[in-house]
Image (tube, rainbow, N blue to C red):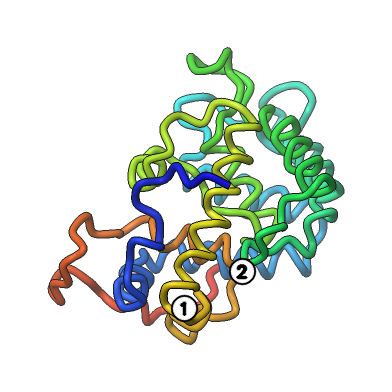
């Protein structure tokens, strides 16, 4: 498996990873905690509504127009809950998906990932990009949510730049980069003789690896690797928002 990324976590020390996690924007932690509760305990309509709220806040479909729930009567079918329902069905094949395992992407899981890409291309329906269809930013954020962080990171433009992935235009490109993430994590753990979950602050140690990897390169990341205390802030507020 060839590593194409130029700035994965295998280039970082355990201490640098911990500092990046601690600098992660707490408002996104609140979104995540809320999502996990809704995803597991609420009706499909509520799940679809929260799914849409978070993806809009994360600007997943920008500059295209994202689909809405049926009750909002903003466009014709398919509606957001249609996509979420299909996505939940397909993502059940990924319930044991784990980026710690070098064989995580096999015939069955790759099939599920391809199907999820095809489903969530329809997250947007109008706009100047891709004839209105969603791209890797929206799709990878949607899959990160639905799999509760098993499949990640979300490949927005900043993450792609930091990882050196280049453009990700197809499902095959996305899957190739997920394989690179798997190898990157394995390389980090070999070099540091510890697991990624042992590296991060205790309050995040139970998060799935896709979510942890996403947080390392996500919002509030400081471009320099040199630690300046005044440039970082600890995430202390983990309250759940509704």
Q: Quadrant of the image for the C terminus?
A: bottom right
**Seen in the image, is 129 located left or right of residue 145?**
left
Sequence-earlier tag: 1 or 2: 2
Q: Position of residue 140 (x, y in %)?
A: 58, 43
The circle on residue 238 is 1
**Seen in the image, is 214 located left or right of residue 80?**
left
Query: Badge 1: how crowded within 10 Å, few (<14), some, or many (20+)?
Result: some
Q: Position of residue 217 (x, y in %)?
A: 38, 56
Q: Is residue 224 above or below residue 233?
A: above
Q: Is residue 1 above or below residue 103?
A: above
Q: Nearer the viewer, mark 1 or mark 2?
A: 2
**Seen in the image, is 76 located left or right of residue 8?**
right
Q: Position of residue 209 (x, y in %)?
A: 57, 66
Of all residues shown, which one is farthest toward the bottom? 202
Instruction: Give the quadrant of residue 18.
Output: bottom left
Query: At x 72% / y 48%, what residue is drawn?
Result: 48
The circle on residue 13 is none
Q: Please name whichever residue, 162 or 79, is drawn nearer the observer in this view of the structure.
A: 162
Query: At x 79% / y 51%, what residue is drawn?
Result: 91
Which residue was labeled with disc 2?
A: 208
**Seen in the image, is 108 located left or right of residue 60?**
right
Query: Badge 2: how crowded within 10 Å, few (<14), some, or many (20+)?
Result: many
Element under label 2?
Answer: loop
Marks 1 and 2, Cα distance to the nearest angstrom? 17 Å
Query: At x 75% / y 33%, what residue is drawn?
Result: 119
Q: Please name whichever residue, 23 or 12, is drawn nearer the observer in this view of the structure.
A: 12
Query: At x 61% / y 27%, what residue is drawn?
Result: 170
Find out whether the residues at labels 1 and 2 contact each other: C-beta distance under 8 Å.
no
Q: Please name whichever residue, 122 or 1, is drawn nearer the observer in this view of the structure.
A: 1
Element under label 1?
Answer: loop
Q: Is residue 92 above or below residue 198?
A: above
């Amino acid at each position: 498996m060839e590593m194409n990324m130029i700035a994965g976590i295998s280039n970082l020390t355990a201490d640098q990873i911990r500092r990046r996690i601690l600098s992660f924007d707490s408002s996104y932690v609140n979104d995540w905690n809320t999502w996990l509760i809704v995803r597991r305990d609420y009706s499909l309509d509520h799940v679809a509504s929260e799914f849409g709220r978070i993806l809009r806040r994360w600007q997943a479909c920008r500059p295209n127009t994202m689909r809405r729930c049926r009750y909002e009567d903003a466009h014709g079918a398919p509606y957001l809950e249609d996509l979420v329902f299909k996505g939940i069905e397909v993502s059940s094949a990924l319930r044991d998906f784990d980026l710690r395992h070098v064989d995580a992407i096999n015939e069955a899981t790759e099939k599920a990932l391809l199907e999820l890409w095809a489903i969530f291309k329809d997250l947007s329906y109008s706009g100047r990009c891709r004839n209105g269809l969603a791209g890797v930013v929206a799709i990878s954020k949607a899959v990160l949510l639905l799999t509760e962080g098993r499949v990640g990171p979300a490949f927005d433009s900043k993450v792609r730049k930091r990882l050196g992935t280049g453009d990700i235009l197809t499902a095959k490109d996305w899957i190739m980069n997920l394989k690179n993430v798997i190898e990157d994590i394995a390389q980090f753990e070999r070099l540091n003789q510890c697991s990624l979950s042992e590296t991060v602050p205790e309050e995040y140690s139970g998060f799935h690896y896709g979510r942890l990897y996403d947080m390392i390169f996500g919002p509030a990341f400081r471009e320099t690797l040199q630690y300046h205390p005044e440039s970082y802030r600890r995430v202390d507020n983990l309250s759940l928002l509704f």
